Image: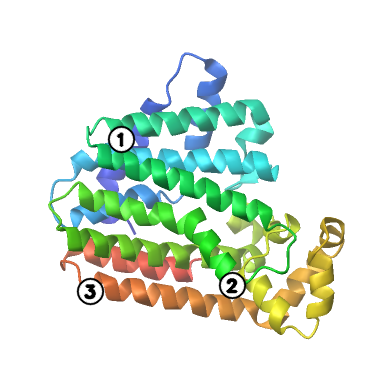
Amino acid sequence: MFGLVNRELKQVEAAMLDSIDTEIAELREASVHLVRGGGKRMRPAFALLSARLFMERIDSVIPMATALELIHMATLVHDDVIDDSVLRRGRTTVKATWGNRVSVYAGNYILARAMALTAQYQRQELVEILALASMDMCVGEFRQMESGFNPEQGLKDYLRRIQRKTALLISISCKLGAMLSPATAQQIKTVERYGHCLGMAFQITDDVLDYVADEKTLGKPTGSDIRQGLITLPALYALEHSPERGQLRAWMSSPELTRQHAEEIIDGVIDSGGIDYSLELSEKYALRARKLLEKLPPGEARDSLARITDFVVHRSF
């Protein structure tokens, strides 16, 4: 899927490990555990491919691509503390192995290293974009926390939340990659909008997979979101359209009842048509992303981004 930038992604992987090297053994071990936990590496790939749309040599983008993945990883390690998660991608979390304090320090350390990498470009606007995005992502996570076990939220609340939580970092990954190339201001804007649409499709699909994916494939227990009180798009649809919406609303309003009736809630959401509705919306965002790609220079990079767009909405993990 990322064949065009595989060489650069290997360099990003090495740069990530170099960036988190520290003389404090426990901090180093926790950070290395997080990096070696793997992941799709989509954010660095988007930065690299966005630059590749406009130039052949993209080695200069590797520090930025590394910084973007480090920021993503910092949010994950903090999320695992908040969610009390034991598994991520089929491996024990830093929180489960080293505890909350080491996890928080590791996340903070990784985030600081990302900012240091970005500062190497000596371009204030790059640092500002990442700093503002990091703050907005925190707001998104806070809004998600506020919305827990609240069945009164609406579609706009959900879309605003996932824009901040997920789509924003994917969008700026595309934008920053293009900013490090000879792209015009209009082309940078188009790439950024592409990333936004793809990020929205990615998160909606992710929320669907939490209900229907195989636990071994997903790398975490099925139904994790609903058990934590996260009412995502499939559940929002069920709360409006299911014949059992009154019962579902009562269960989802209570942490205790949600835990007791989690399997029944999951079945109710699936039976309501919430999965199909969510996948249709994900495909609409993906269609917008494909149309935006048509405005960008043709070539291998654009073809790669088109394949990634298809993968995002049809993936099983």
Q: Residues within 10 Å of mark 1 (few under 14, many from 20)?
A: many
Q: Report x, y in % for residue 10.
A: 32, 40
Q: Nearer the viewer, mark 1 or mark 3?
A: 1
Q: Nearer the viewer, mark 2 or mark 1?
A: 2
Please give left or right for residue 227 compared with residue 279 in the image: right
Dividing the picture into quadrants, the one containing residue 227 is: bottom right
Dividing the picture into quadrants, the one containing residue 125 is: top left
- Marks 2 and 1, how far apart at CA: 35 Å
CB atoms of marks 3 and 2 within 8 Å:
no
Reading the image, the residue beneath label 2 is 155
First along the sequence among labels 2 and 1: 1
Q: Measured along the vertical axis of the image, is residue 72 above or below residue 28?
A: below
- Which residue is pictured at 39% across the width and 55% down the height? 170
- Marks 3 and 2, how far apart at CA: 29 Å
Dividing the picture into quadrants, the one containing residue 226 is: bottom right
The amino acid marked with disc number 3 is: Glu
The amino acid marked with disc number 1 is: Thr
Please give left or right for residue 297 compared with residue 221 in the image: left
- Which residue is pictured at 65% across the width and 82% down the height? 273
Reading the image, the residue beneath label 3 is 294
The amino acid marked with disc number 2 is: Leu
Q: Nearer the viewer, residue 38 or 55?
A: 55
SS under mark 1? helix
**Dot label at residue 118:** 1
